[in-house]
């Protein structure tokens, strides 16, 4: 997501020159009169315009790798969009690959890791990737800086990571349903051991406890962030003697599976059962009804991770190793008071 800094049009207006002239000065071109260059440079500095690096054949643009958990996933697509935008603004090239990292005898496959060195990568962003101790050690040994985006497990001490306030997001989703009047609320989490999933379920439990409500064990289900698995978990919930009137699904993909299962059961969303998701992917806006969800700032997370990586590429070490960006509840039409 681009930041709101001054544009070249603003710089040109302040300096009393054309936009092409301002662009020439910002990009280090030589064909500008000295007095004009001085005036434009002064405005660039005063307004805090961030100039892109000027790349030449003997100084090619930096190249980084973005390693995602899979390429055919809407979540990865949103992160990729954020990285591409930030990398474009910084003049950095990005190579994207899926984290198909298999190990043999506890050792990483040489091909995947060696490609990082072979193409001269300046750093790596890992999105939802799960690395083992040997792979972390390999990256450190080769002095390749890296940042984790929403890591699956807690990374080793000192490894920078960027995520969202998952626990607070779980609280917000549950409090919304409570405020509507729901008391029989179920949760469908993702992988049990995944950090973000366990935090969202913990937020759900905390909000229910704060409301003085006991959560029946059968109201807590787990899937794998998959629509089909969530569909099955919702069928199990609806088969209970006292099914829930509302469900918090810990991803939008799972929430869509929940809605489909409810419809197949002859229930209306939200007339008979309310559903809240998590992520705010495009599908949440396109679904019918529009999905109430917790917005995870995916593009901002990606841009923040890239900024951290650039600092590390310059030899700096971030002061904090864990950065969390705020989530926000987005209310649409999949939630309503219980009937």
Image (cartoon, rainbow, N blue to C red):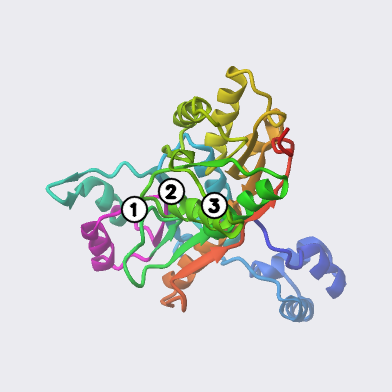
Please state, as top left, top right, bottom left or bottom right, where the N terminus lies in the image: bottom right
Query: Vertical placement of 17 versus 287: above or below?
Result: below
- From the image, tell me which residue sits under label 2: 95
Q: Position of residue 25 (x, y in %)?
A: 70, 70
- From the image, tell me which residue sits under label 1: 119
SS state under label 3? helix
Residue at the image position 27 percent from the left and 61 percent from the top = 136
Q: Quadrant of residue 144?
A: bottom left
Looking at the image, residue 77 sits to the left or right of residue 126; the answer is right
Q: Position of residue 221 (x, y in %)?
A: 44, 39
CA neighbours of label 2 inside 10 A, class few (<14), some (14 to 19), many (20+): few
What is the distance, in whole Å, between disc 1 and disc 2 at their CAs?
10 Å
Please state, as top left, top right, bottom left or bottom right, where the C terminus lies in the image: top right
What is the distance, in whole Å, between disc 3 and disc 1 at their CAs?
45 Å
Pick whichever of labels 1 and 2 is earlier in the sequence. Answer: 2
- From the image, tell me which residue sits under label 3: 204
The number of callouts visible is 3
């Amino acid at each position: 997501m681009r930041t709101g800094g001054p544009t070249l049009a603003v710089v040109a207006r302040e300096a009393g020159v054309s936009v092409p002239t301002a662009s020439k000065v910002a990009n280090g071109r030589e064909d500008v009169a000295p007095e004009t260059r001085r005036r434009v440079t002064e405005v660039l500095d005063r307004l805090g315009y961030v100039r892109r690096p000027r790349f030449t054949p003997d100084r090619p643009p930096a190249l980084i790798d973005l390693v995602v958990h899979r390429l055919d996933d809407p979540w990865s697509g949103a992160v990729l969009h954020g990285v591409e935008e930030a990398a474009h603004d910084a003049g950095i090239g990005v190579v994207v690959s899926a984290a198909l990292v298999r190990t043999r005898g506890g050792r990483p496959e040489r091909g995947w890791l060696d490609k990082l060195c072979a193409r001269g990568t300046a750093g790596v962003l890992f999105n939802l990737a799960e690395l083992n101790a040997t792979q972390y050690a390999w990256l450190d040994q080769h002095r390749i800086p890296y940042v984790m985006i929403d890591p699956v497990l807690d990374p080793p001490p000192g490894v920078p990571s960027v995520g969202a306030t998952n626990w607070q997001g779980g609280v917000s989703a549950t409090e919304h349903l409570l405020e509507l009047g729901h008391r029989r609320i179920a949760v469908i989490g993702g992988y049990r051991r995944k950090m973000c999933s366990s935090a969202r379920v913990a937020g759900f439990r905390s909000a229910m406890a704060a409301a003085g409500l006991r959560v029946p064990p059968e109201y807590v289900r787990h899937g794998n962030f998959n629509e089909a698995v969530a569909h099955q978990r919702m069928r199990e919930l609806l088969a209970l003697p006292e099914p829930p009137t509302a469900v918090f699904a810990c991803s939008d993909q799972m929430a869509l599976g929940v809605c489909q299962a409810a419809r197949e059961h002859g229930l209306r969303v939200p007339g008979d059962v309310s559903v809240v998701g998590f992520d705010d992917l495009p599908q949440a806006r396109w679904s019918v009804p529009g999905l109430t969800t917790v917005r995870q700032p995916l593009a901002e997370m990606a841009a923040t991770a890239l900024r951290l990586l650039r600092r590390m590429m310059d030899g700096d070490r971030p002061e904090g190793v864990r950065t969390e960006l705020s989530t926000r509840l987005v209310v649409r039409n999949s939630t309503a008071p219980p009937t």
